[in-house]
Image: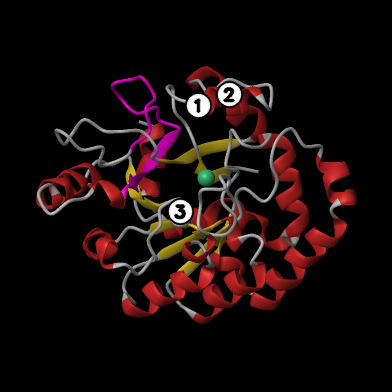
């Protein structure tokens, strides 16, 4: 089965090397490519985390630092937004830099780190980005649910904060990363109710897992997921994502395969990502050039 990983991380600098070491991997291009080939992943959407030097004196927009001039053909990215860096002075320049970078074929949308960033998803600081997302018809991926750091504030990453933005910006497509975990029910409701809200299933397990043991020891959790995704009954709105290098890719695929009824595997592991990330098809076509 061909797979698109709709949510992963990559940086050739910073602390992803340590995260990758937890799963006996390296966060470098050859390792990532090997993992992709092993698992049938044809393209990964990386969430921007690194400072860009496009704007002098600003860390916006956040990108993937992969160390190559050209993007590897098996990767694309969402531009990370750091709202606390936006000031009245640099606002215009910052937005212009985002718009310019968004026009790159490998830029598939935006990423908001709600919870890590202490702003509600519908905060006015994000509105210009929503307007850009609408203009270019690209989605906004939002971190929802638990934060890896205790400095995160959970009220900002609760799925209900996405509902506010989804209603106010009906022409913008929002992806709730991690299915709001552990607020699975709330995330399912927000995605079910709003035609413009989707879910990625990344980050529901962490580390070097063994799928069989995880599915057996976490049977209650898996059943809960299956129940509420089934209740939502919109398998056209779900996308596979791993959060690699936070979790072992091969085993995580097995976990999500067990959560999703087999008849929807193609949709969840591939087709939905191509539809929701509107620029993704072009990235796939470029691979064959
Ligand atoms: Zn992530």
Where residue 65 appears, x then y in whole percent? 37, 27
- Is 70 one of the magenta-colored residues? yes
Instruction: Determine which residue is flagged by label 2.
Output: 18
Foreground pick, 2 / 229:
229
Mark 3, residues whose alpha carbon is within 10 Å: few (<14), some, or many (≥20)?
some
Name the residue rendered at 45%, 32% in the picture: 74
Give the mark toward the camera: 3 or 2: 2
Report if the CB atoms under discs 2 and 1 are less than 8 Å apart: yes
**Which quadrant would the C terminus be assigned to in this image?**
top left
Looking at the rendered image, the quarter that the N terminus falls into is: top right
Q: Secondary structure at mark 2?
A: helix
Between residues 179 and 37, which one lies in front from this camera angle? 179
Spot the residue most to the front: 151
Q: Is the residue marked by circle 1 packed among few (<14), some (14-19), or many (20+) residues within 10 Å?
A: few
**Residue at 60% across / 50% down in the picture?**
202
Along the horizontal axis of the image, is 150 left or right of 54?
A: right
What's the colour scheme?
Answer: secondary structure
Up the image or down, 165 lies above or below 110; here it is below
Q: Where residue 112 appears, x then y in whole percent?
A: 39, 54
Q: Which residues are magenta?
A: 63-82
| Cα separation between marks 3 and 2 | 31 Å
- Which of the 4 image quarters holds residue 64? top left
């Amino acid at each position: 089965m061909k797979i698109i990983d709709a949510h992963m991380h990559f940086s050739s600098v910073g602390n992803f090397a340590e995260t990758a070491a937890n799963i006996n991997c390296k966060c470098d291009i050859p390792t990532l490519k090997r993992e992709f080939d092993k698992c049938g992943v044809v393209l990964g959407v990386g969430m921007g985390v690194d400072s860009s030097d496009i704007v002098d004196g600003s860390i916006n927009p956040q990108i993937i630092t992969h160390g190559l001039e050209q993007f590897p053909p098996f990767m694309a990215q969402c531009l990370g937004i750091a709202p606390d860096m936006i000031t009245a002075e640099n606002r215009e320049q910052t937005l212009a830099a985002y718009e310019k970078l968004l026009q790159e074929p490998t830029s598939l949308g935006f990423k908001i780190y709600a919870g890590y960033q202490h702003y509600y998803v519908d905060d006015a600081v994000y509105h210009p980005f929503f307007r850009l997302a609408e203009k270019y018809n690209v989605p906004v991926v939002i971190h929802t649910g638990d934060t890896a750091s205790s400095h995160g504030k959970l009220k900002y990453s609760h799925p209900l904060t996405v509902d506010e933005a989804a209603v106010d910006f009906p022409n913008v497509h929002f992806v709730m990363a991690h299915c709001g975990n552990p607020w699975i029910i709330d995330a399912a409701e927000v995605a079910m109710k709003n035609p413009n809200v989707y879910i990625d299933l990344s980050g529901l397990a962490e580390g070097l897992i063994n799928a069989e043991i995880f599915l057996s020891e976490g049977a209650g959790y898996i059943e809960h997921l299956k129940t509420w995704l089934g209740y939502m009954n919109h398998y056209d709105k779900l996308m596979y994502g791993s959060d690699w290098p936070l979790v072992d890719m091969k085993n995580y695929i097995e976990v999500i395969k067990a959560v999703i009824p087999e008849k929807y595997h193609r949709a969840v592991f591939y087709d939905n990502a191509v539809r929701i990330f509107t620029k993704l098809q072009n990235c796939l076509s470029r691979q064959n050039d």
